[in-house]
Image: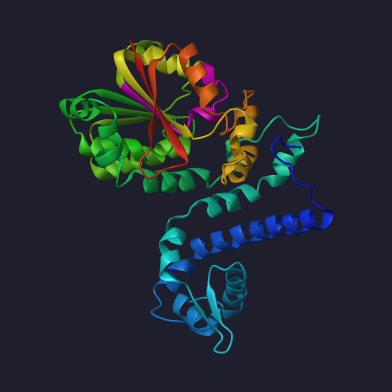
Amino acid sequence: MADDQTTVETTEQFALRLTTTVSSGFVTLAVAIGVRTGLFVKLGEQDGPRTSVQIAEAAGMKERYVREWLAVMVTSRIVEYDREKRTYFLPPHRRDVLKSTQMPEFMRLLAGVATDVADCFKLDGPEGVPYSAYPDFQAWQADIRKQEVETNLVSKFVPMVPGLKERLESGIRVHDAGCGRGITTLILAQHFPNSTFVGTDLDRDAVQWAATESNRLGLVNTTFQVQDVAKLPADWSDSFDYVLAWDAIHDQADPEGVLRELYRTLKSNGLFSMIDIRSHTELADNLDNPAAPMLYGASLLHCMPVSLYFGGRGLGNMWGQELAVSMLKEAKFTNIRFLDVPDSPANIHFMCQKL
């Protein structure tokens, strides 16, 4: 029992709470369907209440499916329903939230590997789950990253790092470690043509996507390559002025080795930005975080098993800032500071330096 759980809970109360929790899971999957099909967009375009037939016709979809989906949205208090007219309406103040939410889609992706993860629990089961079991993950992550940084990376994030904007403008060498589809690199490269950018990731398809997009944009200051960031090339020592790792370290099989390699390849007085999930290492310290069950769930179904698949440590995305700081210090990083990540309250920015 948690230390702060002092009230007595009856069997009936727990049963009701569990029903509510399970119901929320179904709502989440239905929300993901609404995002994926564009139904929320169609509802947002309405200038007033509409019937399920009208909504289905406007969306070009089957009415029966739309009506059942709307029932989930109404009973979860997301969409308003007029019983007499049998019309549905999505209030304006909910539209932007639903337009920007990406976690329900992530849950939909993770639901497909729940059986694989369950098998890993067995003593004679697999150690983890390969990246190949998440075929849509890189596309989803790229959408998340674009949403996080498209409007504020240059205007808000970069100015928070002392001297970084001026250095990028004059021309420095930057490494985006675990870059995925390279969204961050592509944005920075367009705004700072005097600097050169290297993006690395283990996922060959993601790296190819980034390289293709770079060519489409006509960028000549980017390089993307398939690379294990725990084993960077020997001739990269003291090569980079700035290294960036965005939600990448906790997934690594050898996070300590990765941090040592990033330190080795950073120039003296170089800067390192590690963006990761805002959390604490001690479970009890996360009890008051309303997003903790979702974040631990994402860790259970993705972050931890992909690390363990490679024989890794399986940190999970809730490894916490206390452990993160300890590992950064062990890798010899100094001047470690906590910074906010603009418009991304779930993340924390560990700003470090190599002296």
Quadrant location of the C terminus in the rendered image: top left
| Residue 219, x across and y down, in percent | 24, 37
| Residue 201, x across and y down, in percent | 45, 30
What span is colored magenta in the figure? 242-256
Q: Is residue 265 part of the magenta span, yes or no?
A: no
Q: Identify which residue, 82 or 240, lies in the foreground.
A: 82
Quadrant location of the N terminus in the rendered image: top right
Residue at position x 62%, y 35% from top? 130
Q: In this view, does 321 lie above or below 135?
A: above
Quick check: can you spot residue 187?
A: no
Q: In this view, does 316 lie above or below 229?
A: below
Q: In the rendered view, how is the structure colored?
A: rainbow
Looking at the image, the residue that sits furthest to the left is: 170
Residue at position x 62%, y 39% from top? 287
Quarter-of-image position of residue 261: top left
Q: In this view, does 72 lie to the left or right of 79?
A: right
Q: In this view, does 327 lie above or below 185?
A: above
| Residue 50, x across and y down, in percent | 48, 83
Q: Is residue 256 left or right of residue 334?
A: right
